[in-house]
Amino acid sequence: GPALWDGPGAPADRDPWRDPGSAARLGEPVEGDAAPDRAPGSGARLSVREVLFGKRVHPRALALLAVIALAIGAVGGVVGHLTASGAQGLTEPGATLTSTSDSKERPPGSVADIAARVLPAVVSIEIKVGDQGGTGSGVVIDPAGYVLTNNHVVAPAAQGNGATIEAIFSNGQRMPAAIVGRDPKTDLAVVKVAVANPTVARIGSSSSLAVGDGVLAIGSPLGLAGTVTDGIVSAVNRPVRLDSGGSDTNAVIDAIQTDAAINPGNSGGPLVDSTGAVVGINTAIRSLGQGEGGSIGLGFAIPIDDARRIAEALIRDGSVKHADLGVNAKSVTDGTTDGAQVQNVVAGGAAAAAGIVEGDVILKVGDRTIAGADELVVAVRELAPGQSVPIELVRDGRPLTVTAVLASD
């Protein structure tokens, strides 16, 4: 029989509305097929509990949740009020600071007073050789613009073509400088700056220094111009052999030792005493590390008495002649006495003429006791060429005194 979905006289498999391959036809709707219009009716309204929880929460639970929410809000309000009150307690819109007292007094002789007087006479020295450069310090020692510094500061400019030297004063003024003379054996040099009416440092005396005297080191350590450090004299007459640092410096100095902080760049700057007078030229430091190091409280300065004599000779002649004994020596000791043992004697030199031979141990030159080879060098260089000096020595266990007429190097 016909299927349930077949219409009367119209099998379902032949119904054009069910045939995917049948063509579409448009026409007027059949009368009587339109659905009657129905006005929407009003239904029951949903409660908040039904909307939010779908009747799954009991009304008493909703009331409890409302109470908890109100409690949390109240606690938050109290905390906010306390926080605002605390913040207001830390600030005061109408606050004013009490007026400050007058500036600290800096009496004559104080570190600040000495620094203010000496700094205008101290310059920073900048060297440029091609794309290389270096810095050091110097001190104005003459109204004509002569500046005393270290040889190792200006040596690169003297050895390089196209090098330039500039002196920078405490007021920032930059002026070109020219080398007047150098002395590699004492690590001193003089440059001249064409400046009008410069402030000149007051030159003191290093011979009157005693261990414990207060001193200031002034210069441009690490390129920091106008730096002042405070310390004391730790030792005097300390023989120190200087590192050449790549320059032609070959010096042994009879140094003033100080614990005033001295760093690379301080070289050539003044060491001044408690009156503001220059008593030394800062030259070297002792470091625990390799190469350049910082201050560990062991700095060395050339005594101004020696530096003044060298500077005057360089300004007059451009070079310096030193006394020479004509020996090479090494430091020795027998456990009770130290000295400098002669290793070789220069033929025709002062020592050879005085009868000094290899193996002799020199114990004293003039009034100065010799404790080693470096001290022998500085003792001889402090004397003048042509000067006669008694030399005490030991030869084969026997004490002997000879007189040497010092030659010139």
Image (tube, rainbow, N blue to C red):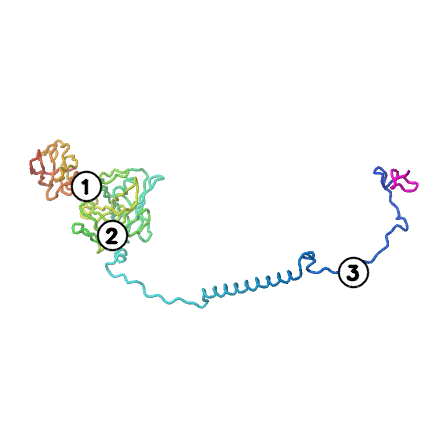
Q: Nearer the viewer, mark 2 or mark 1?
A: 2
Q: Secondary structure at mark 3?
A: loop
Determine whether, in the image, residue 3 is placed left or right of residue 328: right
- Give the amino acid at mark 2: Gly
The image quadrant that residue 399 belongs to is top left
The image quadrant that residue 112 belongs to is bottom left
Determine whether, in the image, residue 349 is placed left or right of residue 164: left
Q: Are marks 2 and 1 in contact (CB under 8 Å)?
A: no
Residue extent of the magenta highlight: 1-15
Which residue is denoted by mark 1 in the rendering? 320
- Give the amino acid at mark 3: Ser
Query: Which quarter of the rendering shows the N terminus?
Result: top right
Which residue is denoted by mark 3 in the rendering? 42
Q: Nearer the viewer, residue 239 or 307?
A: 239
Residue 120 locus on image (x, y percent) = 28, 54
Q: Earlier in the sequence, mark 2 or mark 1?
A: 2
Label 3, label 2: how many angstroms apart (C-alpha)? 102 Å
Label 3, label 1: how many angstroms apart (C-alpha)? 123 Å
Which residue is denoted by mark 2 in the rendering? 231
Label 2, label 1: how many angstroms apart (C-alpha)? 32 Å
